[in-house]
Image: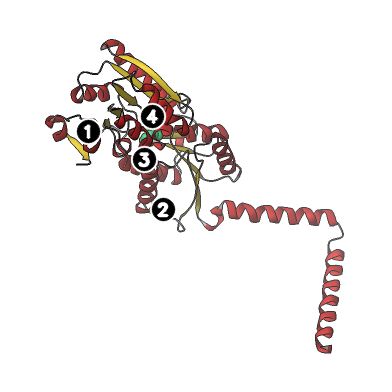
Amino acid sequence: MKKNLKAVILVCMSILLLSLVGCTANPDKESQTGLEDKKAAEQSEKVANPDQSGEKMIGIVQIVEHPSLNTIRESFVQELAKEGFKEGDRISIDYQNAQGDQTNLKTICQKFANNKYDLIVAIATPSAQAAAGETKTIPVLFSACTDPLGSGLVANLEKPGQNVTGTSDAVSAEKIMQLAKRITPKIKTVGALYNSSETNSVSVVKDLKAYAAKNGLKVVEATVTNSSDVQQAVASLTGKADAIFSPIDNTVASAMPVVAQVANKAKIPVYVGADSMVKDGGLATYGINYTVLGQETAKMAVEILNGKKAGDIPVKMMSEMDIYVNKDTAKAIGVVIPEDVVKEAKVFGK
Ligand code: TRP
């Protein structure tokens, strides 16, 4: 017990002595605090940006988790590793999901910018718009933005010029509607189901209207602001529309099982913009392969990580498209998909 007390006194005395030495060696207390602040800042910078350890820091921001966006992200990370940028080796990844919320998106992108990450990968248009709004210096690589020009992400697809470039999943409303005509030739009124604040959807719906005007179709709209509006919006189209058209809309894609449930009950065919929306119960689309899109995005990331300026890399459009159909949905709504369409298509369901 006595021994312990002695040890405590000894320790206290050495602490006192050490602090006294510290004070005489550094009479200017303020500058010492400044130094410590700087050291602390450097330390936190090191945590946020492990550049000093040779690792590049990549922030991935995704507006919401739905199957297509998850496919893109997984394929991106896999391809990056294949190209020699493995997590925990040459890169560190900070993945954030905004859960469909604009305020979250802003907070996430602000954090990425404040931490001075080396690259921001923004999956889907709303994420890309938020990221581009927070930094003019850190490269922003967008992924699967349907209309990068109309969404204000780049001013020129060939020469983006600023710190923003990426991949686009532009689709053709006309081609999807031509497919719709092959499967359900009698449709006269099409219900456009989308979130009017998603610029990626607005541009496709504009094309749909142009196609409809030329081809004697009528378009009625059902817009939503978040995924909890979707059920009501689909219900509002039953009795009004012979078919539903939903573009590559993140809000609708997140609620696709609900769309299928309501539309199938009303026996309305749903034509969509992406394969995952067909897999989740839509009837058909003519669209791109998102695994390939993720890989292409990774190749652009490699160029940027190796020092190329984002603004010098042209936006990559995906040119290969396939027909996707869902036979379970066809059965549920009593539609027979013509054999020639099935032959050309990638088929979900039996
Ligand atoms: N193209 C969408 C955008 O610009 C993102 C997206 C990719 C998407 N794949 C999808 C949306 C599938 C709905 C369904 O934001």
Label 4: how many Cα within 10 Å (few below 14, some 14–19, many 20+): many
Q: Is residue 100 visible?
A: yes
Q: Is residue 126 left or right of residue 211?
A: right
- The residues tagged by marks 4 and 1 sit, at their Cα atoms, a distance apart of 27 Å
Residue underneath mark 3: 68
Residue underneath mark 2: 85
Labels 2 and 3 touching (C-beta < 8 A): no
Mark 3 within 8 Å of ligand 1, using the beta carbon: yes
Residue 231 rendering spot, x and y as whole percentages: 41, 31
Q: Compare marks 2 and 3 and give the one earlier in the sequence.
A: 3
Callout 4, which amino acid? Answer: Thr
Dividing the image into 4 quarters, which one contains the N terminus?
bottom right
Which of the labelled discs sits on residue 330, or is there none?
A: 1
Q: Tell me the SS state at disc 1.
A: helix
Quarter assignment of residue 283? top left
Q: Compare marks 3 and 1 and give the one earlier in the sequence.
A: 3
Mark 4 within 8 Å of ligand 1, using the beta carbon: yes
User: Of discs 2 and 3, which sits in the foreground?
Assistant: 3
Front one among 175 and 236: 236
Q: Is residue 80 left or right of residue 320?
A: right
- The residues tagged by marks 2 and 3 sit, at their Cα atoms, a distance apart of 23 Å
